[in-house]
Every structure is written in C-alpha cells, then in structure tokens.
Amino acid sequence: MADTIFAKIINRQIPADIVYEDESCLAFKDVNPQAPLHILLVPKKPLDKLSSADAGDEALLGHMLLAAGKITRELKIEDAFRLVINNGEGAGQTVFHLHMHILAGRPLRWPPG
Ligand code: DGP
C-alpha cells in the first residue's frame, strides 16, 4: 500500500492537531471539518478500507471502537456524536487509509446525505 497522507501524519512527516494516540491508533482533527468537532481516528497499521479488513483485524477494529468511545468521553461529546466510515470512492472515501470520522457539536440529521 502506497503511503497516504494519513501514513505521513502517523509518521510525523506532516503535522496534524493530534488529540489521541495509543499503541495501535491515532486521532487528529480533520483539516476540512464538517462539524464544530470533527476528528479522524486511524489505525497505525496501513489498511486501505474497512472492506479489506479480515479476521486478523478483529482486535484492531474492536480497539478502534473502544478508542472512539474514550475520545468522545475525553472531549465530553459522549452523549451526541456520529461515527462514520466512508468505504470506497462511491461512498466518498478520498484517503485510502481506513479512518473513522467522529462528528459532533451540531445537530446531526438522519438520513445522512
Ligand atoms: P474521506 O472522505 O472519508 O476519505 O475523509 C478524508 C478526510 O481527510 C476529509 O474529511 C479531509 C481529511 N484530510 C485530508 N487531508 C488531510 C490532512 O492532510 N490533514 C488532516 N488533518 N485531514 C485531512
């Protein structure tokens, strides 16, 4: 997998506003926020998209969901946030390194566009 912009953020080759880090994932503010609080949570392991994950990624994906919950508690948005994964170009994925969007701070309508 070619190095994406997120790999460069993980490797500290380019800067980002990092809000959380542990041994297997990193979270930072989205450069083009779609809500007052818009965080991206990425695995340190390169994985292009959710649909490429396999059974070997089970612990990592569970870990990321727990990390998302922890981040929302730390940011005090645990009562109202949305977690989004865009998978594939047709769904709006532009960076091919798996990431979860954590969105909060405004009313979040349903269904999403
Ligand atoms: P997606 O469309 O789901 O692939 O989301 C990619 C997101 O990544 C998009 O909301 C903008 C964000 N993004 C792209 N380049 C950068 C960057 O260099 N830094 C940060 N912090 N976010 C970026």
Image (cartoon, rainbow, N blue to C red):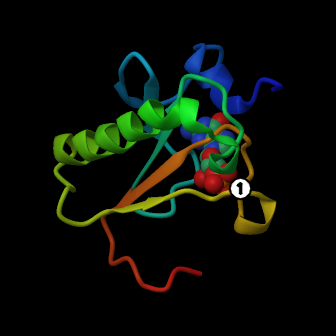
Q: Locate residue 77: give its quadrant.
A: bottom left
Q: Does the residue labelled 1 lie within 8 Å of ligand 1?
A: yes
Q: At 66% across and 24% down in the image, what residue appears?
A: 7
Q: At 19% across and 56% down in the image, what residue appears?
A: 78
Vertical comparison of 17 with 30: above or below: above
Vertical comparison of 96 with 26: above or below: below
How many residues crowd mark 1 within 10 Å: few (<14), some (14–19), many (20+)?
A: some
Q: Provide the secondary structure element on which disc 1 rests.
A: loop
Q: Position of residue 112 (x, y in %)?
A: 52, 80
Classify residue 93 as left or right of residue 65: right
Classify residue 77 as left or right of residue 85: left
Q: Where is residue 34 in the image (x, y as percent from the top left)?
A: 51, 63
Judge whether residue 30 can be spotted in this image.
Answer: yes
Which of the pair 52/43 is nearer the observer?
52
Q: Locate residue 97: give its quadrant.
A: top right
Vertical comparison of 20 with 53: above or below: above
Label 1 sits on residue:
93
Which of the pair 103/89 is nearer the observer?
89
| Disc 1 residue type (three-letter) | Gln
Judge whether residue 27 can be spotted in this image.
Answer: no
Classify residue 82 as left or right of residue 55: left
